[in-house]
C-alpha cells in the first residue's frame, strides 16, 4: 500500500494477496513507519521477500508507533526469502522496531505447521520472530496480548516464536499469547524470545502464555546452542 507512512495513518478492513519483493524495509502493507500506524481487521496473504527489515505488515517502525488489532497473516505467505542466507530482522508482522513502540492485540500469524511442509515459513539468517524480528529499542511501554503464532520458523541465529532479538529500555508486556510450530534453527532459539536483554527492573511482564501444538500443527523447537522453551538467551537484572 505504501513505501513509507508519516503522521497518523489508519488501515482497516483490508485483504491482500500476491507477491512483494525488495531489499530493505519491505512490508506487506507499509515498508517504513515513521509516525503512528493503526492496523485493524486486516488480513495479509501476500508472499514477501527481502534481505533486511522484512515484515508481514511493516518492514521497519522507526521513531514511531504501530498498533495492531485483529490483524492476521494468513496461510499463504513467505516472509523473508527461504534461499536468502543474508536476510536479517524478519518478522511475521514487523521486521524491526527501533526507537519506537507497539501494541499487538488479538492478532495472529497462522500457517498449519507440519514437518513435511518446508515451503511456507518465516525465515532468515538472524533475528527472526513470529511477530517481530528485532526490537532494537523501545521509546514507550509496549505489549503483545491475546495473540498467537502457528507457523514454522527457520533462522541461523536469534529465533523466537514471538521475537527474535530484543533489548528493552521500556516495559514489554506479553500476556495470553501462544506459539505453536516448528523451529529448525541454529543458536539462541526460544519458544517466545530468541535473545532478550534488559538491565532495569520489572521491564518484562510475562503471564499466561503457552507453547503448545494447535491448529493441527506439529511442534518442535530445536537448535545447536542455547535452546529453550521460552528463552534462548536471557540477560536480566530481575524478572
Image (cartoon, helix red, strand yellow):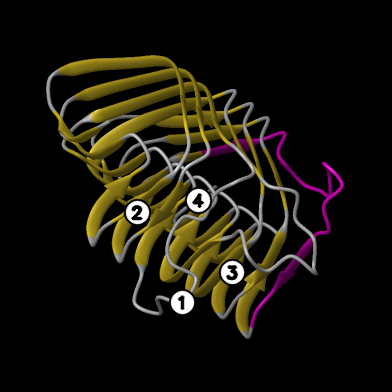
Residue 220 falls inside the magenta stretch: yes
Q: Which residue is mark 1?
A: 83
Q: Which mark is residue 189?
A: 3
- Crowdedness near tag 2: few (<14), some (14–19) or many (≥20) residues, C-alpha within 10 Å: many
N-term-proximal mark, 1 vs 2: 2
Q: CA distance from mark 3 to mark 1?
A: 20 Å
Q: CA distance from mark 1 to mark 2?
A: 15 Å
Q: CA distance from mark 4 to mark 1?
A: 39 Å
The residue that appears at 80% across and 59% down in the rendered structure is 219
Q: Which residue is mark 4?
A: 238
- Tag 2 and tag 4, C-beta contact below 8 Å: no
Q: Is residue 1 visible?
A: yes
Q: Which mark is residue 106?
A: none
N-term-proximal mark, 2 vs 4: 2
Nearer the observer: mark 2 or 4; the answer is 2
Q: Secondary structure at mark 2?
A: strand
Chain part drawn in magenta: 205-223
Nearer the observer: mark 4 or 1; the answer is 1
Extreme residue in the right direction: 216
Q: Position of residue 69 (x, y in %)?
A: 49, 20
Q: Which mark is residue 54?
A: 2
61 relative position to 236: left or right: left
Amino acid at each position: 500500500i505504501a513505501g513509507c507512512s508519516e503522521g497518523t495513518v489508519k488501515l482497516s478492513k483490508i485483504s491482500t494477496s500476491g507477491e512483494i519483493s525488495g531489499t530493505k524495509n519491505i512490508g506487506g502493507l507499509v515498508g517504513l513507519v515513521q509516525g503512528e500506524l493503526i492496523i485493524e481487521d486486516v488480513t495479509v496473504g501476500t508472499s514477501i521477500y527481502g534481505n533486511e527489515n522484512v515484515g508481514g505488515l511493516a518492514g521497519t517502525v522507526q521513531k514511531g508507533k504501530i498498533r495492531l488489532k485483529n490483524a492476521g497473516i494468513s496461510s499463504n505467505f513467505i516472509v523473508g526469502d527461504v534461499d536468502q542466507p543474508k536476510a536479517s530482522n524478519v518478522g511475521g508482522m514487523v521486521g524491526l522496531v527501533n526507537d519506537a513502540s507497539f501494541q499487538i492485540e488479538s492478532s495472529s500469524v497462522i500457517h498449519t505447521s507440519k514437518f513435511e511442509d518446508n515451503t511456507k515459513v518465516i525465515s532468515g539468517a538472524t533475528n527472526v520472530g513470529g511477530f517481530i524480528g528485532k526490537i532494537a529499542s523501545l521509546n514507550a511501554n509496549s505489549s503483545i496480548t491475546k495473540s498467537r503464532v502457528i507457523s514454522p520458523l527457520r533462522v541461523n541465529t536469534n529465533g523466537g516464536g514471538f521475537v527474535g532479538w530484543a533489548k528493552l529500555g521500556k516495559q514489554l508486556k506479553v500476556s495470553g499469547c501462544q506459539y505453536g510450530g516448528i523451529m529448525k534453527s541454529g543458536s539462541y532459539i526460544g519458544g517466545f524470545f530468541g535473545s532478550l536483554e534488559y538491565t532495569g527492573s520489572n521491564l518484562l511482564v510475562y503471564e499466561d502464555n503457552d507453547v503448545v501444538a494447535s491448529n493441527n500443527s506439529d511442534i518442535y523447537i530445536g537448535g545447536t546452542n542455547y535452546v529453550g522453551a521460552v528463552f534462548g538467551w536471557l540477560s536480566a537484572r530481575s524478572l
